[in-house]
Image: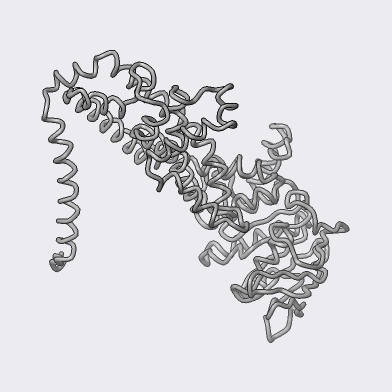
Amino acid sequence: MSRRAFDPFWLVLGIITGSYLLFWLGLLGAAAVHSSPHDLWHALQTREIRYAIWLSLITCTLTAGLSLLLAVPVGYLLARGYFRGRVWLDAALDIPIVLPPMVVGLCLLIFFQTVVGHLIERVIPFTYTIAGVVLAQFVIGAAFAVRTMRGTFEHLSERPENVALTLGCTRTRAVWLVTLPAARSGMFAAASIAWARSLGEFGPILVFAGATRMKTEVLPTSVWLELSVGNLEAAIAVSLLMVALAVVVLASVRLVGERV
Amino acid sequence: MIRFDNIAWRAGAFALEKISFTVPAGRYGVLMGRTGGGKTSLLEIICGLRRPTAGSIWLGDHQVTQLAPGERGLGYVPQDGALFSTMTVREHLGFALRVRRRPAGEIARRVEELAGPLGIAALLDRHPPGLSGGERQRVALGRALAARPQVLLLDEPLSALDDDTREPLADLLHRVQRETAVTVLHVTHQRSEATRLADVLFRLDAGQVVETPLNDPLYV
């Protein structure tokens, strides 16, 4: 078997990719070796951080579920709906992705100072509450989930759904019986992306839900609070925990997503 | 019977105008035409998946132009089958009856009844990714026939198959039509299929459909 001729093109691409990966591994490695595993473990055992871990896990899961509930119909409309103004709607739904996170928090805060906002808060108080944490995560997480679901529906052929219509289904039933089961992996990916995005959400939560310990403190808030009092060990411990969670989510999307 | 009565349809620069032709009840109609000439669009107009800009569609004695696809009483086999990727062959064959909320026993009997003659009895628990091209078309055909439609629409059902698979499937289409007396409209760009299967032959050319004698040496 003859060896392929050496091509410096691939070598250059390999060096660029390797350097980028090395840079990231260097950053994570530096954080990991800064403290001993014992200190890190100890930091994670504090009452406040344990609360933040649970609050993060619960709010991210709620946000992922809510984001998926929104992303499935909106993604379907964007992928399969043919109507005037679709391009503008598509662009408008990207606004939360491109807005600075702090601005999203500020918009939420101001909205709930309006008459409509006050009326909503009579039923569910959002400002500086756990519900506010979920809402702040949802505003951004849902935008990412919508992107993912739109892509999923665009890649699925319309024809099986059309055949289901000819076999007696209404459009709703055809989507339910044929399209949604085929979109399972996309739905899993959309929920995972919303979950992972929510886990790292900080700006809007800080502005809209506050950073009150044992109340609205999620993991990114913990990093900020611990850093602000000079407790680097705890900040690193929480950061590494978030990295580990992000890796688990990424790996799940890759492994489970292909099988679902 | 399938009747097009002055049907017009337009998509961008492409247009079909004043299309009128009839496939008599219980006959095997073949519509020939070049790829991209609008054959699939005509089938989708019959199905109700595309709305014509003018004219009417008749299936039997009923004008169905305004009816939803599922109310038209037809079976549709699109190109490459368009199978449901998450369902087994058994679920495909039972789908139309399940949608009509028929009892489980009736669905099971109908599945067995279809699977034997279609040669897919051994595949009932398989999913589409594990099926060959010919098997996929048989499943799509069974799915379309399950609710005993009065009209069967076939979009290039043999085009993607190799010679060894095409012949038996052509035999099967012929036999199914004869045994069920379903009115068939089969679109294709291949003359050999037309001569083999057609009771009545039509040609779609430059946006017009004309009936062509089966023995016309110019076309067949």
- Answer above or below: position of A85 versus A201: below
Tell me if A226 is positioned left or right of A5 in this view. right
Look at the image and tell me in which quarter the N terminus of chain A lies. Answer: bottom left
Look at the image and tell me in which quarter the C terminus of chain A lies. Answer: top left
Image color mode: one colour
- The percent position of residue B97, horizontal first and vertical second, equals 71, 40
Q: Residue at x 61, y 76 (%)?
A: B34
> Residue pushed farthest bottom?
B218
Q: Which residue is drawn at 56% across and 59% down?
A: B80
Tell me if A108 is positioned left or right of A7 in this view. right
- The percent position of residue B113, horizontal first and vertical second, equals 69, 43
- Answer above or below: position of B189 versus B139: below
Q: Which residue is drawn at 75% across and 75% down?
A: B17
**What is the quadrant of residue B50 in the picture?**
bottom right
- Answer above or below: position of B152 versus B101: below
Query: Which of these two is toward me, A232 or B204?
Result: A232
Query: Which of these two is toward me, A8 or B162?
Result: A8
Query: Which of these two is toward me, A201 or B192?
Result: A201
- The percent position of residue A193, horizontal first and vertical second, equals 39, 39
